Amino acid sequence: MQTATAQQIALLHHTLGLRVDQRGPYRNYFVAGPGHHDMPDLEALEKLGLMARGRPPAFCDQDSIMFMTTDAGRALALDTLPDPPKRTRYGEYLAEEGNCSFGEFLCGTRLPKLETQRDYRQVGGRWRYVYRHRMYRGAWDGVHGHYNEVQGEWASTKKAAKASYKAALKVHQQAQRAQAQEGQQQ
């Protein structure tokens, strides 16, 4: 028995409106006119009993042919649909109906924040605004309330503030690991 080629199966998917991310058929038609480049494959699918001919809609050229999948064609199309790819963290973020940024989605309340202060000082004989920045990660303690769990040093640029925060975070993580190992030894 002859089987459908990969191109013919792709035509079945297209006819039904199937994609890797659209697994439910939402249509069942393929309109092709005389000389259409897919006509040989559509006719081969018809001979295999996977497609059937119908009349084209009134708004189409009446020389065209409307092909529809049969039940066997629909079953083959659904069986050959590839498995969806594993959802990424960003895909999970897009699927969630939350009102947060991607960073907040990943880190929650542990997302670092940037603090900026502005001073008006005399620089080089002229009065100017001078900015300084610091990154920190806040935490909540039931006894003391909100506090800065990890914080970098004040810096004149955001880039330097981020580098300082990363260094402080690294020290904080090493201290937590050491504390966890000490707790396991006891």
Image (cartoon, rainbow, N blue to C red):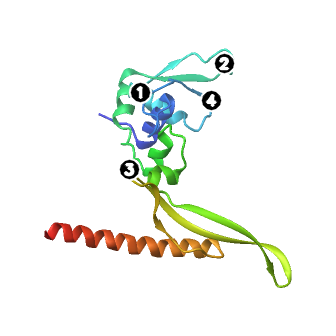
User: Is disc 1 placed on a helix, strand or loop?
Assistant: helix
The tag earlier along the polypeptide, 3 or 1, is 1
Quarter of the picture holding the C terminus? bottom left
Q: Find numbered disc 2 in the image and state the secondary structure of the residue it sits on.
A: loop
User: Separation of disc 1 and disc 2 at Cα?
Assistant: 22 Å
Quadrant occupied by the N terminus: top left
Under tag 3, what secondary structure? loop
Going by the numbered disc 3, the residue's amino acid type is Gly
Give me the disc on residue 74. none
- Above or below residue 71? Residue 114 is below
Whichever of callouts 3 and 4 sits on the residue coming sooner in the sequence is: 4
Residue at position x 81%, y 79% from top? 122
How far across and down, in percent of the image, does residue 92 sit? 44, 45
Among the two numbered marks 3 and 2 on one chain, the one whose residue lies closer to the N terminus = 2
Residue at which label 3 appears: 142
Total marks shown come to 4
Q: Who's the residue at 50% across and 51% down the image?
A: 104
Q: How busy is the neighbourhood of tag 1: few (under 14 within 10 Å), some, or many (20 plus)?
A: few
Which amino acid, mark 1? Lys
Residue at (58% x, 72% y) in the render = 161
Q: Which residue is mark 4?
A: 34
Q: Which residue is mark 2?
A: 62
Q: Nearer the viewer, mark 1 or mark 2?
A: 2
Residue type, label 2 = Gln
